[in-house]
Image (cartoon, coloured by chain):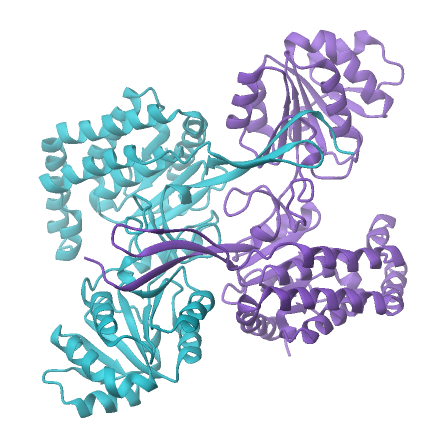
Chain colours: A cyan, B purple
C-alpha cells in the first residue's frame, strides 16, 4: 500500500469511527479511559522494552541528549500516563450539553448543543507520553484521533496504542477511534494535514519548526501556537515587591516553557528606582539582560556583580529565548507598553504589574493576546491553572480557540431547533 | 502602485484601525452606525446615480438579468440599508463581556473576555447592499473590515463607502476601519485571502464558485458555507399533517435560499400512506421529484395529474438544486436516514418529522449538521429567526462558528487573569 492510500485508509476509518464516538455515552468513554490506564500499568514492562528499542536506535543515530530525554519512558512516566487518563475520565463530559434553549417569537425553541469536532489529527515529536494524553483528550471529547508521533518513538507509540485499543475494545468502542500512524515515512504528515474530507482539525505539538511546517502546508484548520514572546510590563504605579516577585517567577521558574516571560517593559517613571532591584534579582539567577540604551545606562550605573548586560538589537523584541535571557526596555508608560506588546508580541500571554485600576482595566481590554493578566505571573497561562483539567495545547490563533485548549476546544456547537409542526411565515 | 502594494497598504491601515476599533466604546460605535444610516438616506439620489452608472455598464456588457437585479439599488433598498444599520446599532455590544470569572485554588481569578477578531475581509458579488450590511456588522463587533464587492458594483460601493466613512469620522473613529477595495483587478482577492499578517478571517458571501475559489486559495481562515443540501426526514411516527406542512414550507417557500430543503427522506413504514399526499402537494407547486425506485413506484401508482417524476441518479442525493426540484428517497428508518444525511448532506440544516421522543433525541445528537431540527421547517435556519439580530453568513464549517453567524461569530474570547502579586508554585 502506498503512503497516500495508507493515510486515506486511516482517514476513512477515523471518519467512520467518529460517528460512533459522537454518540458514545459518557460512562462508556470513561470506561475505555479506565481500561486504557489499567492496560498501560499492566504492560509497563512491555512499554519499557519497546521504549528501549527506540532509545537504542536513537543513541545509534546520535540524537541529542534533550531528544533522548524526551523520548525516555520510566516507571514514573508510565504511571503518570495512566494517572492522566484517569484524570481525564474524571472530567465532566462536554459533549451534548445544550445551552440557551429559548422560545423565539415564531414559537420554535432554539439552542446550541456542544458536539465533537469529528476527526482530530495530532502531530507531535518523540514524546511517547503524548500518545496516551492526546488519545484520552480526543476520546473524552467524542472525537476520533489520528496520532502521528515522531518516528524515533515508533515502537513506544505502538506499544501504547495497543493499550489504547484494548481500552476502546473493552468498552465496545471502535478501535479506529484512536489510530497511530505506523510508518516512519515523513510524507504521512503531508497527507494528514491536507485530507480535509477525513480530518477536521490538526493540533501540532512540538517545536517551532514542526508547527511552522504544519501551519504553512495544512489545508485542514490548525490549532497551534507558533511561539511565546510573553511580556511583563511594570507600570510606574506598580508595587515594587509584587513586580520583583512576578518578574522572577515569570522569567526564572522555568526557562523552556512557552508562558515564560521573554520581554520586560518598565515605565520610565519607575525605571530608575526599580530596574536596579529587578536587575539584581535577574543577575542572581544568571539571566542575561538584552537592554535598550536607557535600561542599559541604568543597569550599568547600578554596578551589579556578575550581571550580563548586552545592548538589545531590534530582533530581541520579537525573540522567544527559551533560555536565561530577557529583553529589557524602558517605555514611556501604558500606551507605549500596549503598542510595543501588540507590535512585537506573539499574542500568547502578557501581564501588567500596577496598582492603578484604570490602567489595569485598559491593559486587559487593549492588549490583543490570548491571555492578559494583572499582577500575576505569565506562568499561570496553563490549562490546569485555568481549571480546564487538561490541555491539548495553547492556541495563539484567534479563530475557534485562544489560549490553553482543553476538552471544550476539541468541540464545537451546533444549533438545535425544536418545533411542533412550525413553518416559517 | 501595483496591486500587491495597494492591498498591503489597505491591510496595514486596517490592522492599525482595528486597535482603535477594539477599544471603542459602544456608544461611539452606535453613533457611527446612526450617522452612516443618516448619510445613506441623505445621499439617496447620489447612490442611485452611482448605481445607474454601474447598471449602464452591466447592461452594455450583457450581464444576466439576475445579476442586474441583484445589482440594482432602489429607494426602497437604500432605505433598507439605513434601517439595517440602525438595527445593528440597537443590538447588544458583544465586545468586552467577561464570563466565568472565578477564583482558582492558586488565588488568581480566571475568566474569559469577548474580543473582536481584528481585521475581517468580506468578499461578495455585485450586491451593493452588502457593503453597508457587512460594514455595520464588522464595526459593531469591534473589527476593522476590508470589503471587496463585485467589480460590477464598484461605483455603487464607492458611494456607499463614502457614507460609511462619514459616519466613522463623525464618531471620531478611524476611516480605515472600513475600507472598500477600489479596483476591479481580480488579483485583489488573491492578496486579500493570503495576507495573514493583516487579515484575521475571510467571509465570502456569494455563489458556490466564489466560495470554492476563496476556500481553495485562502491562507487566512475562512467562515463559509459551500452549499446547502438540507434534508427533511419524515419518520414513520410522523404526524402526517405536520409532515406535509413542513415539507411544503421547507421546499416551496423560497427555492433559491441555502436553507431550502433539497432532499426528502421518507420512512418505508409510512411511505405508502404519506408519499402520495406529499407528492400531490409538491406537484401542486410544480416541484419536480427525482425519486429512488421505491418512491417512483409509489408516486407513479398514485397518478398525480401534472406530476413530474424522474428517476434519481446517485448525483441527486448530493445536489443543491436552488430550484423547484427535490430528491425523494424511501429509507428503512431512523438509522438509514441519519447515515444518508451524514453521507450525502452538506452539514447545513436537517430536520426530522416525528412524534417519537427517542428518535427525535437521537436525530438531534447524531446528525452532524450546523442546525438540526425536530418538527420544524429547515427555512428557520437564519440569524434573525435564531435571535442573533443580524447575520453575516451561515457557516457549515465546524471550527469557530457553525450555522448562522451573527456578531458573536465575528468575535473570539481571550483569557483574563487577575492577581495580587500571585506567582506559580
Q: Nearer the viewer, residue B216 or B112?
A: B112
In the image, taking residue B230 as reference, residue B279 lies left or right, namely: right
Q: Nearer the viewer, residue A159 or B253?
A: B253
Residue B416 position in % (x across, y down): 39, 59
Residue A393 position in % (x across, y down): 33, 50
Quadrant position of the C terminus of chain A in the picture: top right
Quadrant position of the N terminus of chain A in the picture: top left
Q: Tell me: residue A152, above or below residue A372.
A: above
Rendered residue at 54%/61% (across/down) = B194
In the image, taking residue B261 as reference, residue A343 lies left or right, namely: left
Residue A346 position in % (x across, y down): 38, 66
Residue B387 position in % (x across, y down): 65, 43
Q: Nearer the viewer, residue A415 or B287?
A: A415
Q: Tell me: residue A75, above or below residue B338.
A: below
Q: Could you tell me if residue B187 is visible in this image?
A: no
Instruction: Please tell me how many numbered marks the rendered image carries.
Output: 0
Q: Could you tell me if residue A352 is visible in this image?
A: yes
Q: Tell me: residue A3, above or below residue B193.
A: above
**Quadrant of res A26:** top left
Rendered residue at 42%/69% (across/down) = A363
Q: Tell me: residue A305, above or below residue B222.
A: below
In the image, taking residue B214 as reference, residue B298 lies left or right, namely: right
**Quadrant of res A141:** top left
In the image, taking residue A89 as reference, residue B119 lies left or right, namely: right
Amino acid at each position: 500500500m502506498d503512503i497516500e492510500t495508507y493515510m486515506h485508509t486511516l482517514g476513512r476509518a477515523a471518519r467512520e469511527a467518529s460517528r460512533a464516538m459522537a454518540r458514545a455515552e459518557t460512562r462508556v468513554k470513561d470506561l475505555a479511559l479506565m481500561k486504557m490506564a489499567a492496560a498501560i500499568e499492566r504492560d509497563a514492562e512491555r512499554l519499557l522494552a519497546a521504549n528501549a528499542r527506540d532509545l537504542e536506535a536513537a543513541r545509534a543515530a546520535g540524537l541529542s541528549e534533550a531528544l533522548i530525554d524526551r523520548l525516555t519512558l520510566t516507571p514514573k512516566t508510565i504511571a503518570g500516563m495512566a494517572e492522566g487518563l484517569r484524570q481525564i475520565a474524571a472530567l465532566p463530559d462536554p459533549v451534548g450539553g445544550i445551552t440557551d434553549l429559548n422560545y423565539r417569537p415564531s414559537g420554535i425553541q432554539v439552542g446550541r448543543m456542544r458536539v465533537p469536532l469529528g476527526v482530530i489529527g495530532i502531530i507531535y515529536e518523540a514524546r511517547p507520553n503524548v500518545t496516551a494524553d492526546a488519545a484520552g483528550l480526543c476520546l473524552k471529547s467524542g472525537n476520533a484521533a489520528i496520532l502521528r508521533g515522531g518516528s524515533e518513538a515508533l515502537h513506544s507509540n505502538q506499544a501504547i496504542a495497543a493499550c489504547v485499543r484494548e481500552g476502546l475494545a473493552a468498552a465496545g468502542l471502535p478501535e479506529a477511534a484512536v489510530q497511530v500512524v505506523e510508518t516512519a515515512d515523513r510524507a504521512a504528515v503531508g497527507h494528514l494535514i491536507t485530507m480535509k474530507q477525513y480530518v477536521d482539525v490538526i493540533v501540532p505539538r512540538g517545536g517551532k519548526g514542526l508547527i511552522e511546517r504544519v501551519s504553512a502546508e495544512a489545508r485542514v484548520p490548525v490549532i497551534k501556537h507558533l511561539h511565546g514572546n510573553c511580556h511583563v510590563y511594570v507600570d510606574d504605579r506598580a508595587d515594587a515587591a509584587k513586580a520583583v516577585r512576578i518578574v522572577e517567577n515569570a522569567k526564572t521558574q522555568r526557562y523552556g516553557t512557552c508562558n515564560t516571560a521573554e520581554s520586560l517593559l518598565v515605565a520610565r517613571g519607575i525605571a530608575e528606582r526599580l530596574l536596579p532591584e529587578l536587575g539584581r534579582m535577574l543577575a542572581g539567577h544568571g539571566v542575561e539582560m538584552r537592554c535598550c540604551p536607557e535600561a542599559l545606562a541604568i543597569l550599568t550605573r547600578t554596578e551589579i556583580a556578575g550581571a550580563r548586560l548586552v545592548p538589545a538589537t531590534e530582533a530581541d523584541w520579537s525573540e522567544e529565548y527559551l533560555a536565561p535571557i530577557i529583553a529589557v526596555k524602558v517605555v514611556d508608560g501604558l500606551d507605549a507598553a500596549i503598542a510595543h506588546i501588540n507590535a512585537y508580541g506573539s499574542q500568547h500571554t502578557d501581564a501588567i504589574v500596577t496598582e492603578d485600576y484604570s490602567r489595569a482595566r485598559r491593559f486587559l481590554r487593549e492588549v490583543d493576546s490570548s491571555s492578559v493578566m494583572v499582577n500575576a505571573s505569565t506562568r499561570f497561562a496553563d490549562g490546569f491553572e485555568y481549571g480546564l483539567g487538561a490541555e491539548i495545547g495553547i492556541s495563539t490563533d484567534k479563530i475557534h480557540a485562544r489560549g490553553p485548549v482543553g476538552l471544550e476546544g476539541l468541540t464545537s456547537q451546533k444549533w438545535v431547533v425544536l418545533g411542533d409542526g412550525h413553518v416559517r411565515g
